Image (tube, helix red, strand yellow):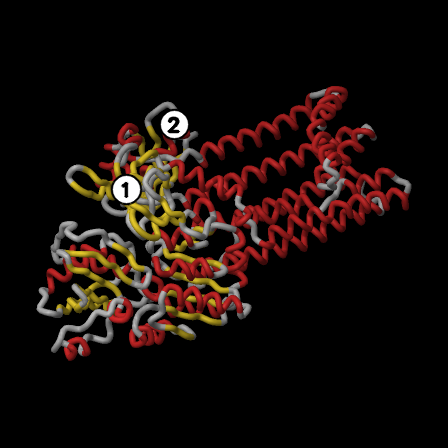
Amino acid sequence: MKATILHESRGRVRFRLCQQRLTLRQADLLETWLQRQPWVRSTAVHERTRCVILAYSGERETVFAALRAFSWQAAEACVTLPSHSTRALRREFEEKLTGKVLLKAASTLFLPPPLRAARVLWHMLPFLRRGLSCLRQRRIKVELLDALSIGISVARLDFGTAGSVMFLLELGELLEEWTRKKSVADLAQCMSLNVDRVWLRGPEGERLVPISQVRPGDVAVVRAGGVIPLDGLVLEGEAAVNQASLTGESIPVVKRPGGMVYAGTVVEEGECVLEVKQASGQSRYDQIVAMIQQSEQMKSATESKAAELADRLVPYTFAGSLLSLLLTRNPARALSVLMVDFSCALKLAMPLAVLSAMRQAGEAHITVKGGKFLEAVARADVIVFDKTGTLTHACPRVVQVVPFDGREEREMLRLAACLEEHFPHSMANAVVEEARRRGLTHEEFHSRVEYLVAHGIASTVNGARVLIGSAHFIFEDEGCTVPQGEQERFDALPSQYSHLYLAIGGRLAAVLCIADPVREEAGQVLAALRSQGITRTVMLTGDSARTAAAIAAQVGVDEFQAEVLPEDKARYVARLRQAGHTVLMVGDGINDSPALSEADAGLAVSDGAAIAREIADITISAESLWELVELRRLAMELMRRIRSNYRFVIGFNGALIALGVAGILPPAMSATLHNLSTLGVSLRSMSPLSLESKK
């Protein structure tokens, strides 16, 4: 890359590319490539000026060497761009908006009155068609109001009023469409699949490769708890696939050889070998865009009520106009009432406010899948936490391996890592990381790995059944025993750690002691949530009561339950909802997915299991629990804004109607003020919510 440095300070540089023109695709490509570099803090690429603003960390020489080595060909090979470009969308609507304003100004300033009148008559035809369509359907809607007000203005030869009304209506529709598409695109980008590596099967066996290297025809392996990274055809195996993120189905669908699976869905049980059909990853993005645009799940109760209220108020506007005509015998006053309706602002402002809040959440690394979940967060009075990876750090560490039954410590850790590496949970990650830290490598010498929902993994090694999981799973569900003469060693296991039990052939082979440090901010976050109106905080965990009590005391939850199974968590959340509470559930593991589905809003930690992220209604980053406080504050501020919008729309438009009936406001002024107020409340709804950090 050749570029000229325009301005530079410590950790920040602004430079201009040395090329005549920067296309929209090149700008997207460069920005995406930069965002993937480890030294980039933030970046912005401006295609019109060919300028790049880059904030970076690390050594200046390293950054500039990477920039000098950049090439468009290499970037095309390693970066996959979504089919929907927000940059292209912005350019399209900027041109539409500019063209509409310039055309209106030119016609007003330069066209003689007869031509202006002819333009208004031609321009009003689409409005009249929509109004007549409402009459044919015997429905009184806002389109009929618009057609009547424009038609009556033209009949009175008031072409200026008719033209202004149409211009403002079209401007409002354009701004609404722009904001909605931009919000949907931003949201879809947040929700798009983010898989870095894929298990590929080849002649030399299975290998983990970057997703950018996968091509159509490659054979990939996906096991229980894993996300399907690409669209493909099942070649082998049988799997129960959760497709809720794409279809809304709550029940997993069984996929057998010959069936299609889609990027972003999750294998709940079993495993499958698939032939990759589409390697671009764009299908996932397109499906999410379609889901957001079409799904009624997106609408909160507040949005639905606004739309219903808007439709119900249209007949009253008609009635008010007729009553004004009967009482005053003045068509101008009746037209002033007809020019004002509540539905425009109500239908525009509420969805725009919700979409804007969802986009703002996305900028704070919080992905919200629908407006009703923000409403649930605002109304919630109970919040339930999983422990591991949620109230504790998502990267616990194995601090001790205690072998039993004459086993060797290193071999037991090697075996545990071999089983756990296929299951993306914080405890599993701790085992795999410890094996890597000790330099232990392993081959896939076990048979098919099976994830069992009740906290465990099972496989077969050298003809013996191998199990790893919680005490409940190993000793109660599977009936394993402590080797004879080693009960005293078993009882002396350090109580301050969480324990993961490994059994071979029905006998305990090792206990992995795992330190699971509490998040430093957990106590303060819970206190902040209480100050925001949360009345009850609960911790649910599969750990022993001893470990759970210690963690609960540290973070300060109101109550806790230990040694609970996944179905117990779901039942507990269901009981709270039946008691009239609005419940938020926060988790990160496969075993949290039933409870996440049961809650009014399920929140998953982004570094957790793929199935938890897919089922959850909201995803927060794993960096800090303060995002829960930010989310609650944003949701409550959104509800305040919506209530404020209601009051303004009803009050202002009611005042316009009263002034029109009194003859104070002529129809043209009434229409102008009404449309300007609609634009104003819509623009206010699109603006960022005012949030003050209280960390």
**Lower sequence index among marks 1 and 2:** 2
Mark 1 and mark 2 in contact? Answer it, CB < 8 Å.
no
Q: Which secondary structure lies at badge 1?
A: strand
Asked whether residue 409 appears in the rendered view, the answer is: yes
Q: Nearer the viewer, residue 499 or 632?
A: 499
Q: Residues within 10 Å of mark 2 (few under 14, many from 20)?
A: some
Query: At 14% from the left edge and 62% from the top edge, which residue is drawn?
Result: 412
Q: Nearer the viewer, residue 321 or 495?
A: 495
The disc at residue 536 is none
Alpha carbon distance from label 1 to label 2: 46 Å
User: Mark 1 — residue?
Assistant: 236
The relative height of residue 285 versus residue 567 in the rendered view (above or below) is: above
Q: Amino acid at mark 2?
A: Leu
Query: At 17% from the left edge and 53% from the top edge, which residue is drawn?
Result: 446
Residue 109 is situated, as x and y percent measured from the top left of the image, at 69, 25
How many marks are shown on the rendered structure? 2
Residue 645 is situated, as x and y percent measured from the top left of the image, at 64, 52
User: Mark 2 — residue?
Assistant: 22
Quadrant location of the C terminus in the rendered image: bottom left
Q: Kindly indicate the quadrant of the structure image that contains residue 386.
A: bottom left
Residue 648 appears left or right of 585: right
Residue 366 appears left or right of 147: left
The relative height of residue 398 versus residue 357 in the rendered view (above or below) is: below
The relative height of residue 635 versus residue 243 in the rendered view (above or below) is: below
Residue 294 is situated, as x and y percent measured from the top left of the image, at 53, 42
Q: Kindly indicate the quadrant of the structure image that contains residue 617.
A: bottom left
Residue 549 appears left or right of 187: left
Asked whether residue 13 appears in the rendered view, the answer is: no
Residue 203 is situated, as x and y percent measured from the top left of the image, at 16, 37
Q: Which secondary structure lies at badge 2?
A: loop
Q: Amino acid at mark 1?
A: Glu
